[in-house]
Image: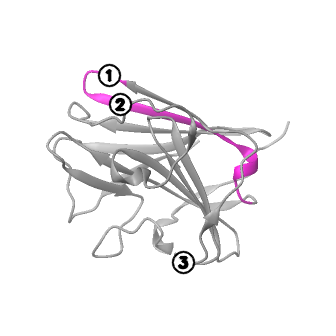
Amino acid sequence: MQTYRLKAHLAHPPARVTGVEGRVIGLADDWLRVRWRVDGARDLIVPAFAGRGRADELWKTTCFELFLRSDGQDGYVELNLSPSERWAAYDFSAYRAGMTQRPASREPDCTMRLGSNFAIFDAAIPRDVLPALPAAANFACVLEEAGGALSYWALDHPETKPDFHSPACFAAVLAPPKHA
């Protein structure tokens, strides 16, 4: 599986974070497993455990996001995953239009691990939350650090302000699993 290096938006630089990577670590019939690695995470603010459940506005603090758009489609799926174990899934019919809650048969499983100067965030996402594959993808995250610094990370930032929904950000590909 390919690892993608995310870029911090120039207008919102990190305080101490030095890099972020996102990658798919597994895709099977029932689950998509993704991982973000944050380097320089010594001052990262990690939301407190809140228990599983849907929640809006997770992006106001440290939050990991995945955007997926099926080939040939205008609509896309946005997934917000918090170290608090709260999550959100939305359908959009077109660029920032027609937002609705996306159904899920099960809740994602989110795990945050902190090292001395790095953090690993893993998420297992129920397969039925995903759109049809193959899909264009955008790995993204909002990182809050001590002192209130918010940085916005994505595969690309074509706009003057952070916009994870921008079609230019969908620079990765999520292919269907290969069966033996």
| Spot occupied by residue 104 in the image (x, y as percentages of width and height) | 72, 48
Q: Residues within 10 Å of mark 2 (few under 14, many from 20)?
A: many
Q: Is residue 150 left or right of residue 72?
A: left
Reading the image, the residue beneath label 3 is: 95
For the residues marked 1 and 2, what is the alpha-carbon distance in whole angstroms?
6 Å
Callout 1: helix, strand or loop? Answer: loop
* Amino acid of disc 2: Ala
Reading the image, the residue beneath label 1 is: 115
Reading the image, the residue beneath label 2 is: 119
Q: In this rendering, is residue 124 above or below 144?
A: above
Q: Residues within 10 Å of mark 1 (few under 14, many from 20)?
A: few
Q: Earlier in the sequence, mark 1 or mark 3?
A: 3
Q: Residue furthest right?
A: 180
For the residues marked 1 and 3, what is the alpha-carbon distance in whole angstroms?
37 Å
| Spot occupied by residue 65 in the image (x, y as percentages of width and height) | 48, 51
Proximity of marks 1 and 2: CB atoms separated by less than 8 Å:
yes
| The N terminus: image quadrant | top right
Going 34% across and 53% down the picture, which residue do you hit? 60
* Amino acid of disc 1: Gly
Find residue 161 and report its image quarter: bottom left
Q: In this rendering, is residue 147 above or below 60?
A: above
Q: Residues within 10 Å of mark 3 (few under 14, many from 20)?
A: few
Between circles 1 and 3, the one closer to the viewer is 3
> In the image, which residues are magenta?
114-131
* Amino acid of disc 3: Tyr
| The C terminus: image quadrant | top right
Callout 2: helix, strand or loop? Answer: strand
